[in-house]
């Protein structure tokens, strides 16, 4: 198996499914068995063999119930129009741990910027997790597809293919010759980098702010069209609200979170003070309808909690407490700090830890009753 796979699979939570993704070193056909059913990496009935990252989508309920899945690969000797030659199927089974009902532990990594060991050390300082949050700029940029593998190295080391990952794109991910192919290497829903997800009693929504300056900024050289991309997310958010009974008001939902690389509730200094109308609309829709408990962000390279009453910071309209939970210093020795979460019935505990193995700060967000 090691001749064909670089890392253990990554199990991404997307909508009501899991997307099981794995980098492959050699050409092969890829499928996954859950229970007695097979799920294939195929395109309109054609098995895929040229993908650098193989992907299959399985219903979350099925994998949660089975508590294991089997990765199957069929190595290819030669693929041709007639009588392709392949080898026998190789299999490896992985355990899978569904999200527990309470005391759910998650760790947030953003802004790793191609650093691997330091973010992993910071996460290990927090301890055992039930799921991992990778919230943008895990890579430095998309100039080289090799950078994408850093996502899978971190995911593999911290989840071992046995626990889910929530993935969100950052602004640095939009930069470079392979940025347009980013969605081929990461989870999406219907090709989109924004979507909702469900993990146990936690419902979440990912919103992708795109780049951090206006589309016509000279830094981008006319390579982005993020304004229309954000407009589409406004429509997406309204559809989520229309379908709330199957989303954040579905049976069993106890916690509601927003994940965005960029904290769009805050107006940054020029030239980063973009899209105020759209971001204010997102904030209002979330505040008045979705009513999340916490917003999880990176981008600013800091460790802070901003509460709704801080009107001088929540300039686009407060939603809920905003946790910015990642910071990196690239000077040697490299330093990284991230953020752990513990979701309980009564509160959400926030724990900042760093690559030196230290716990920097703890704080509890006390939750209002769902019936209030």
Image (tube, rainbow, N blue to C red):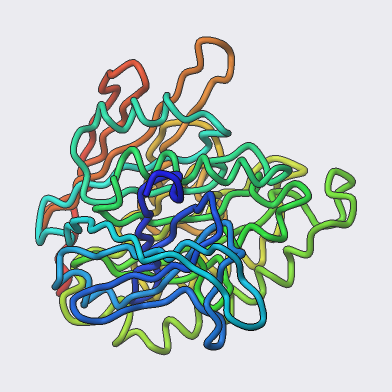
Q: Position of residue 246 (x, y in %)?
A: 31, 85
Q: Position of residue 37 (x, y in %)?
A: 26, 81
Instruction: Using the image, determine if residue 125 lies above or below residue 137.
Output: above
Quarter location, residue 79: bottom right
- Quadrant where the C terminus sits is bottom left
Q: Up-down: is 182 above or below 147?
A: below
Q: Is residue 321 left or right of residue 86?
A: left
The image quadrant of residue 126 is: top left
* Residue drawn at (35%, 59%) of the image: 11
Residue 340 spot, x, y in % from top left:
28, 39
Instruction: Decide if residue 372 is in sight here.
Output: no
Residue 264 against residue 80 in the figure, above or below: above
Q: How many marks?
A: 0
Q: Picture coordinates of residue 367 (x, y %)? A: 19, 56
Residue 201 lies left or right of residue 290; in this view the side is left
Foreground residue among 311 and 273: 273
Q: Residue at x 69, y 49 (%)?
A: 212
Q: Looking at this view, is 199 or 274 the one in front? A: 199
| Residue at x 40% of width, y 60% of height | 258
Left or right position of 191 against 120:
right
Q: In terms of depth relative to the viewer, which is nearer, 45 or 105?
A: 45
Q: Is residue 259 among what the camera can see?
A: yes
Q: Quadrant of residue 248?
A: bottom left
Q: Residue at x 34, y 27 (%)?
A: 122
């Amino acid at each position: 198996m090691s001749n064909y796979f670089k890392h253990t699979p990554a199990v991404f939570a997307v909508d009501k499914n899991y997307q099981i993704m794995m980098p492959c070193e050699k050409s092969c056909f890829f499928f996954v068995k859950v229970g007695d059913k097979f799920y294939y990496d195929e395109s309109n009935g054609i098995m895929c063999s040229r993908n650098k990252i193989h992907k299959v989508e399985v219903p979350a309920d099925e994998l949660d119930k089975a508590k294991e899945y089997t990765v199957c690969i069929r190595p290819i000797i030669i693929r041709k129009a007639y009588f392709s030659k392949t080898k026998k199927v190789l299999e490896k089974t992985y355990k899978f741990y569904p999200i527990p009902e309470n005391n759910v532990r998650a760790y947030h990594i953003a802004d790793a910027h191609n650093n691997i060991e330091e973010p992993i050390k910071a996460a290990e300082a927090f301890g055992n997790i039930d799921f991992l949050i990778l919230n943008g700029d895990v890579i430095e940029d998309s100039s080289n597809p090799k950078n994408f593998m850093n996502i899978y190295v971190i995911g593999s080391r911290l989840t071992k293919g046995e626990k889910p990952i929530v993935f969100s794109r950052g602004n640095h991910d939009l930069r470079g010759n392979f940025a347009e192919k980013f969605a081929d290497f990461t989870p999406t829903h219907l090709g989109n980098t924004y979507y909702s997800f469900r993990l146990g009693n936690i419902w979440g929504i990912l919103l992708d702010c795109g780049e951090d300056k206006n589309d016509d900024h000279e830094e981008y050289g006319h390579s982005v069209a993020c304004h229309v991309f954000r407009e589409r997310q406004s429509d997406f958010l309204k559809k989520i609200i229309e379908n709330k009974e199957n989303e954040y008001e579905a049976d069993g939902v106890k916690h509601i979170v927003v994940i965005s690389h960029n904290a769009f509730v805050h107006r940054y200094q020029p030239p980063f003070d973009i899209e105020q109308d759209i971001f204010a609309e997102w904030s209002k829709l979330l505040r008045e309808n979705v009513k999340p408990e916490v917003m999880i962000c990176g981008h600013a390279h800091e460790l802070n909690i901003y509460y709704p009453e801080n009107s001088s910071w929540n300039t686009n309209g407060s939603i809920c407490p905003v946790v910015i939970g990642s910071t990196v210093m690239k000077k040697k020795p490299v330093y990284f700090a991230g953020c752990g979460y513990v979701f309980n019935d009564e509160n959400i505990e926030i724990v900042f830890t760093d690559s030196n193995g230290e716990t920097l700060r703890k704080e509890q967000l006390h939750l209002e009753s769902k019936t209030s």
